[in-house]
Amino acid sequence: MEHFSAKGFTPGQAKIKLVLDDKRIAAACVGRGDITHLKQNVAAVLDKTELTQLDREVFKNYAAQTCSGYCAGCANICDSVAADIPVSDVMRYLMYYNSFGDTQTARQLFAEIPQQIRDKMLTVDYAAAESRCPQRLPIARFVNQAVRTLA
């Protein structure tokens, strides 16, 4: 992401610019986080800098290198093979915790999962979900991390 830092954009601003550069997308939610993040994101939206083909290629390479580190939110896959564990929700809460630094929201939402489900999380075999995950995420490891850090 140094490529975009050199252009004066934070990684988040660069991502917003790329998303909004896609003519198939009409709007993007830019309000995640605190007021500082919101101001940075709005600044990226208002900035008239056009992305170059090189910018798009840098992003494509970045996405290929990092796609195995995030959940794409395809709950229909992992939630259907992991019994009654809300795997996609747990993965989202970990994203709040790890990527956004929003530990309070992550812990609050995790605590809303019924205790009997949370107790069961470490006993489920996630192999089927992991084998069907398009990102090839180590779901069992992530659920274990969530139980340890969000509880």
Image: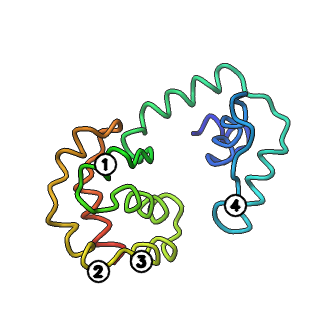
**Earlier sequence position, callout 4 versus callout 1:** 4
Q: Position of residue 16 (x, y in %)?
A: 68, 43
**Dot label at residue 115:** 2
Residue occupied by mark 1:
78
Q: Please say if the residues under marks 4 and 2 sit with CB atoms less than 8 Å apart.
A: no
Q: Secondary structure at mark 3?
A: loop
Instruction: Relative to 67, say whether 108 is above or below.
Output: below
Q: Please say if the residues under marks 4 and 3 sit with CB atoms less than 8 Å apart.
A: no
Q: Amino acid at mark 2?
A: Gln
Say which quarter of the image contains residue 128.
top left
**Dot label at residue 112:** 3
At a point 29% along the width and 50% down the height, the residue shown is: 80
Q: Position of residue 77 (x, y in %)?
A: 33, 44
Tell me if mark 4 has few (under 14), some (14-19) or many (20+) residues whose alpha carbon lies within 10 angstroms of its own. some
**Dot label at residue 37:** 4
**Earlier sequence position, callout 2 versus callout 1:** 1
Between the C-alphas of marks 4 and 1, the distance is 31 Å
Q: Amino acid at mark 4?
A: His
The foreground one among 7 and 75 is 75
Q: Secondary structure at mark 4?
A: helix
Tell me if mark 2 has few (under 14), some (14-19) or many (20+) residues whose alpha carbon lies within 10 angstroms of its own. few
Looking at the rendered image, the quarter that the N terminus falls into is top right
Q: Is 86 placed left or right of 122 in the picture?
A: right
At a point 39% along the width and 79% down the height, the residue shown is: 111
Looking at the rendered image, the quarter that the C terminus falls into is bottom left
Q: Secondary structure at mark 1?
A: helix
